[in-house]
């Protein structure tokens, strides 16, 4: 079922003008780009199948490459409802139908929370429409079944509204009084706990850098418009074949540079060979660099 759903999602993205790359053995299954919009997608039969580690990895990487992490699934222990946004470990999740609507900029207003299905009222818009139609707080409260105090909270953006009350409010004022859930919001940067020596070196040179997990590279670094995807290799853990192809695909799709850092274990200097398609540096040489400018110049000379 996952493969069928992934194929449907991939075809849908292509129809909407996205360039799509599929990946294996990573925290996300598809990367799609259309202009400046980048999506990191995990496609699952059951959204409960995603781990916190995978979700955190998607959010962290998304914050560095300016991408939106999103889960597309059929269920989350139960069937996902059309027009409803769910969340797993801080990553939005929705079904195929809702995802399709979002690609057409028809974002939902209902989100599933611990309190059940809720919506967020645009307080100023509600107050404007209420006053234009001559309704008092009491009149609105009676029609939607809540207290006047609660209606006042809605207008002050201090409370979410239940699905039942939202439906009643919608019948009076329409859906314009609700905030749309933008499932394509770019991920916010998360803390990089216990950074590796490579990530720390990037930071010293002026980059923002983070270690990645479940990705075709080990460190992502950014400085203004410069984006570097860094793979760390040693004699025992060198990657081959498909992993290199995935790194190359991502490099091209994201308009990024790729760098391979060779890290021989136990002080050995043999047994780790450079990947000819990517610029490579011995770990000691990378750590010896003094500035971002020096590294960027090295990468440009490889082109």
Image: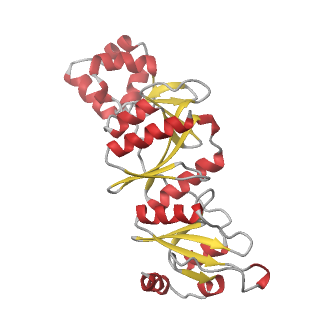
Measuring 56% from the left and 87% from the top, which residue is drawn there? 289
Residue 13: horizontal and vertical position, in percent?
A: 38, 44
Determine if residue 189 is in view.
Answer: no
Residue 75: horizontal and vertical position, in percent?
A: 56, 29
Measuring 42% from the left and 12% from the top, which residue is drawn there? 145
Residue 54: horizontal and vertical position, in percent?
A: 62, 49
Residue projecting furthest to the right: 266
Q: How many marks?
A: 0
Measuring 58% from the left and 67% from the top, which residue is drawn there? 219
Q: In the image shown, does 79 or 125 lie closer to the viewer?
A: 79
Determine if residue 165 is in view.
Answer: yes
Q: In the image shown, does 151 or 171 lie closer to the viewer?
A: 171
Measuring 35% from the left and 11% from the top, which residue is drawn there? 143
Residue projecting furthest to the left: 132
Q: Quadrant of the N terminus?
A: top right
Q: In the image shown, does 199 or 251 lie closer to the viewer?
A: 251
The answer to whether residue 70 is above or below residue 153 is: below
Query: How has the structure been colored for display?
Result: secondary structure
Quarter assignment of residue 67 = bottom left
Q: Quadrant of the C terminus?
A: bottom left
Q: Is residue 149 left or right of residue 176?
A: right
């Amino acid at each position: 079922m996952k493969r069928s759903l992934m194929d449907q999602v991939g075809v849908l993205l292509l129809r909407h003008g996205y360039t799509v790359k599929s990946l294996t053995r990573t925290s996300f299954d598809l990367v799609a780009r259309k202009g400046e919009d980048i999506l990191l997608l995990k496609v699952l039969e059951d959204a409960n199948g995603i781990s916190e580690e995978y979700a955190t990895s998607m959010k962290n990487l998304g914050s560095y490459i300016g991408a939106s992490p999103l889960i597309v699934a059929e269920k989350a222990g139960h069937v996902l409802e059309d027009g409803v946004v769910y969340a797993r470990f801080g990553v939005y999740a929705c079904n195929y139908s809702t995802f399709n609507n979002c690609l057409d900029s028809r974002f939902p207003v209902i989100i599933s929370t611990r309190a059940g299905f809720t919506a967020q009222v645009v307080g100023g818009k509600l107050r404007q429409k209420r006053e234009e139609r001559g309704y008092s707080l009491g009149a609105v409260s009676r029609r939607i079944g809540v207290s006047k105090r609660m209606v006042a909270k809605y207008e002050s953006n201090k409370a979410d509204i239940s699905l039942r009350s939202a439906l009643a409010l919608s019948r009076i004022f329409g859906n314009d009084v609700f905030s749309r859930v933008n499932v394509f919001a770019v991920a916010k940067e998360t803390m990089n706990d216990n950074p590796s020596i490579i990530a720390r070196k990037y930071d010293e040179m002026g980059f923002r850098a983070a270690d990645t997990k479940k990705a075709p590279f080990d460190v992502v670094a950014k400085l203004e418009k410069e984006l570097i995807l860094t793979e760390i290799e040693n004699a025992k853990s060198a990657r081959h074949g498909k992993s290199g192809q995935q790194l190359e695909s991502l490099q091209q799709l994201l308009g990024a540079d790729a760098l391979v850092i060779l890290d021989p274990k136990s002080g050995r200097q043999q047994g780790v060979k450079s990947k000819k398609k990517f610029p490579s540096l011995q770990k000691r040489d990378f750590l010896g660099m003094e500035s971002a400018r020096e590294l960027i110049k090295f990468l440009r000379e490889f082109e």
